[in-house]
Image (cartoon, helix red, strand yellow):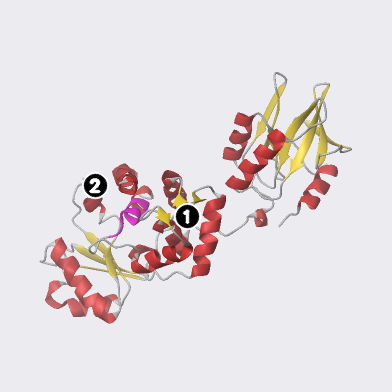
């Protein structure tokens, strides 16, 4: 992880560039981490630089507030330097009227009525500068998902308890790390000692953009003469006594949460051996049928079994699968999303 002292050294050595502007390190004055001269078309502008080694959303907002309130030498413009500036942070800087650079070639330099130069799209040269691992991906995403069931918790232990009640065993340490990251992202916040969801739509979008489909170990198709509801109950009957889990996939569960055309094939996630499940189903499942209407998918991925609803996937799992699908799936995803948000506000 880059330290601020190292970042200041890189600035002084001219390692940070922002073409077509020319940057030159200057001697610092009181209250400055660093100072830069920005030269353009025969003009020179002095910038008073604040350097921050981390730039999570919360820290970035705090840094902006610090830059706004900092005392600067006369005729000096404010600038923030961080390890990496994605496009949304550059847009935030532009709205604030503050210049900002990163160490990878991205940034914005603005002087009112004089210059405005913006550069984006360069990958981070210092990926190790991230504070905590991504908690919106894979099994860690169980913790953020609990806030889409209940938006307020009295303590971290209450989050772990709800996760266990809904089918996922999460360590308290994992809950602590996930909530810490979500606080930095301003997705959740502390209020009178409680932990509260602040931005449900932002949380959904973060989960969606980081979603990875579960790894499927094996597949088995067959036919049943039972109704969808009856087969779902039967599958749970043969799976649960052996310690296994079964649930309709998010896509197949979409009929519960939105008005969609009925698909002839209903898919289920199963945690046990599909061959054993097929044997236990007996006459209620024919794997040799040339006209299958049931698909069994073997997976141990904890996410798909989290918060099941009468043998169907949770609305969150349903939405995640649909938003990652084709055009028709994505169109179906929106009413599911609206249902999730409506239930949170109920």
Tell me the residue at 48%/63% (across/down): 156
Most frequent secondary structure within the magenta stretch: helix
Find disc 1 in the rendering and name its residue.
195
Position of 136 compared to 75: left or right?
Answer: left
Instruction: Report the number of numbered marks.
Output: 2
Q: Position of residue 138 (x, y in %)?
A: 46, 62
- Please say whether residue 202 is visible from this viewpoint: yes
Which residue reaches farthest top? Answer: 113
User: In which quarter of the view is residue 300 placed?
Assistant: bottom left
Query: Which residue is tagged 2?
Result: 258
Judged from the image, the secondary structure of the residue bearing numbered disc 2 is: loop
Q: Which residues are magenta?
A: 313-320
Q: Rate crowding at label 2 as few (under 14), some (14 to 19) or many (20 or more) other CA atoms within 10 Å.
A: some
Label 1: how many residues lie within 10 Å, few (<14), some (14-19) or many (20+)? many
* Image vertical order of residue 242 relative to residue 163, above or below: below
**Helix, strand or loop under label 1:** strand
Question: Viewer-proximal residue, 284 or 202?
Answer: 202
């Amino acid at each position: 992880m880059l330290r601020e002292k190292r970042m200041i050294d890189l600035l002084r050595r001219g390692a940070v560039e922002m073409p077509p502007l020319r940057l030159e390190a200057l001697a610092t004055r009181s209250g400055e981490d660093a100072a830069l001269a920005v030269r353009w078309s025969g003009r020179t502008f002095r910038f008073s630089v604040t350097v921050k080694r981390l730039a999570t959303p919360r820290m970035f907002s705090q840094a902006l507030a610090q830059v706004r309130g900092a005392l600067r030498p006369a005729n000096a413009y404010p600038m923030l330097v961080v390890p990496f500036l994605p496009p949304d942070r550059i847009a935030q800087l532009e709205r604030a009227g503050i210049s900002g650079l990163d160490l990878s070639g991205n940034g914005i330099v603005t002087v009112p009525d004089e210059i405005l130069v913006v550069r984006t799209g360069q990958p981070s040269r210092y990926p190790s500068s991230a504070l905590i691992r991504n908690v919106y991906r894979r099994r860690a995403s169980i913790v953020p998902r609990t806030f889409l069931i209940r938006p307020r918790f009295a303590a971290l232990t209450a989050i772990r308890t709800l996760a266990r009640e809904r089918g996922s065993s999460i360590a308290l340490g994992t809950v602590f790390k996930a909530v810490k990251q979500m606080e930095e992202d301003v997705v959740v916040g502390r209020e009178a000692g409680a932990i509260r969801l602040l931005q449900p739509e932002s949380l959904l979008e973060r989960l969606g953009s980081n979603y990875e489909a579960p790894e499927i170990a094996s597949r088995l198709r067959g036919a049943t003469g039972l109704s969808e509801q009856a087969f779902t109950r039967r599958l749970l009957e043969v799976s649960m006594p052996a310690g296994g889990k079964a649930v309709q996939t998010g896509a197949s569960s979409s009929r519960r949460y939105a008005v969609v055309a009925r698909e002839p094939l209903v898919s289920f996630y199963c945690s046990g051996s599909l061959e054993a499940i097929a044997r236990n189903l007996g006459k209620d499942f024919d794997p040799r049928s040339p006209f299958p209407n049931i698909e069994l998918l073997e997976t141990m991925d904890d996410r798909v079994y989290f918060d099941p609803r009468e043998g169907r996937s949770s609305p969150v799992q349903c939405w995640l699968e649909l938003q990652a699908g084709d055009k028709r799936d994505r169109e179906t995803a929106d009413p599911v999303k609206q249902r999730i948000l409506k239930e949170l506000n109920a």
